[in-house]
Image (cartoon, helix red, strand yellow):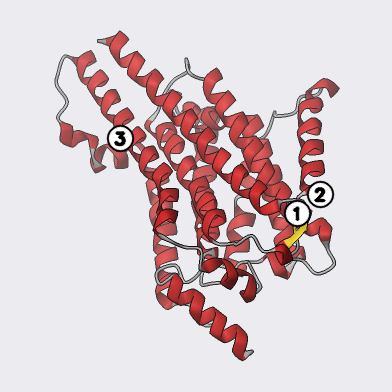
Amino acid sequence: MNGIEVVAAGGSMASPAAGLGLLPLLVAGALWYAELGSRQRAEGAARGTAMPCASIGCKHILSRCVPEVVGLVCCAALAALFLTWGDSEVPSDPADAEAWNKIKQEWPLLTTADTLIALQAMLRLPLVASATFRLGSACCSGGGEGDGATAAAWGAAPAALALAAGCARVAVLLLSPFHRLDGPLGGRLHVAFELAALPPLLGLARGAVGRRVRSLFPFVTVLAAVGCLSWRHRLALADESPSLDALFTAAELLETAAAAAYLARTLAWLGGPKAAASSLLHVLLPLQQGLTMYYWMVAFQDDPSLVGAGSPLSLLKISSSSQVALYLAAAALHLAHCMEEEHVSV
């Protein structure tokens, strides 16, 4: 976050124990690898041939997830380029410059903890863009069950809640310089990625709210609960703008609601068609939210000066951890159902 003193206070929290935040990423990768293996064995059994283990590698992924892989590679290359260049801005105030150098020493690869949030925004864009692309392909040109399965994995309700969270984040970034990210991937680049993710999410969220008034009730209830909770638990980053701090908390809580809706969607879609791209989505969503969880676990200390009301830091840690848990549960259900289908087919 903008405000070098704030990040410097939390940077010292990074420790070997914080590496536990990477555990969900490893679990998610293992889930996807196992799911790909089970699907390969099922396909081999259907053809009466044994599939070699080597076929569960890059060739399989590239052949079935080309748009996703290309987008991820481009984002990774862009992030690597900016991180290699480093941060060119040097604070003019000597105290700020000293604090900034301390942060960069504690985060030698990422420059600052804010890079975790920036990487999350970069990862989100190819995911939602791919799902929107496959939705259009399935609807307009009969792209097949795989394209429809990838778009259906999102679902309109989770996409609508994620869209609301994205709109809240963009509003905070545009209206409050105190909430903008520092570092090579922060600033305008981060805002650009957040803005670019909104149109694809809007396309995925179509139909989330029907024409009947009753269909609005769940969304209004969620928004009211999030608004009330955000106002009671908010940070104190924006000068004399508590509403922006509350909106910042609301964005994180809406992401938790989107994760819960995604899990419910996964339960409802277990009997539907499967695709390698949808499996990739199930894996990358825990990865994406794991970056936020890791950020909140290591970037801030419990400093009373950061608190505007309630216990926002505890709430944000619980919220981000819940998101990872919900997405991992969805991935586990997806894997379990794929393995069950494999046994049935054999």
Depth check: 192 or 86 in front?
86
Q: How many marks?
A: 3
In the picture, the disc for residue 33 is: 3
Question: Is 240 left or right of 16, judged from the image as shown?
Answer: right
Say what amino acid the circle numbered 1 marks.
Arg
Q: Mark 3 and mark 1 in contact (Cβ < 8 Å)?
A: no
Discs 3/2, front: 2
Please tell me in which quadrant of the rendered image residue 98 appears.
Answer: bottom right
**Residue at label 1?**
234
Q: Which kind of residue does numbered mark 2 sit on?
A: Trp
Which is more toward the observer, 13 or 57?
13
> Would you name the residue on which mark 2 appears?
231
Q: Give x and y (percent) for residue 202.
A: 66, 41
Image height check: is 75 above or below 278?
Answer: below
Identity of the amino acid at label 3? Tyr
For numbered disc 3, what is the local secondary structure? helix
User: Where in the figure is residue 289, as x and y percent of width and height?
Assistant: 52, 46
Secondary structure found at label 1: strand
Q: Residue at x 80, y 48 (%)?
A: 232
Q: Is residue 142 visible?
A: no
The earlier-in-sequence mark between 3 and 2 is 3
Q: Please report whichever mark, 1 or 3, sits nearer to the chain's N-terminal start.
A: 3
Q: Closer to the observer: label 1 or label 3?
A: 1
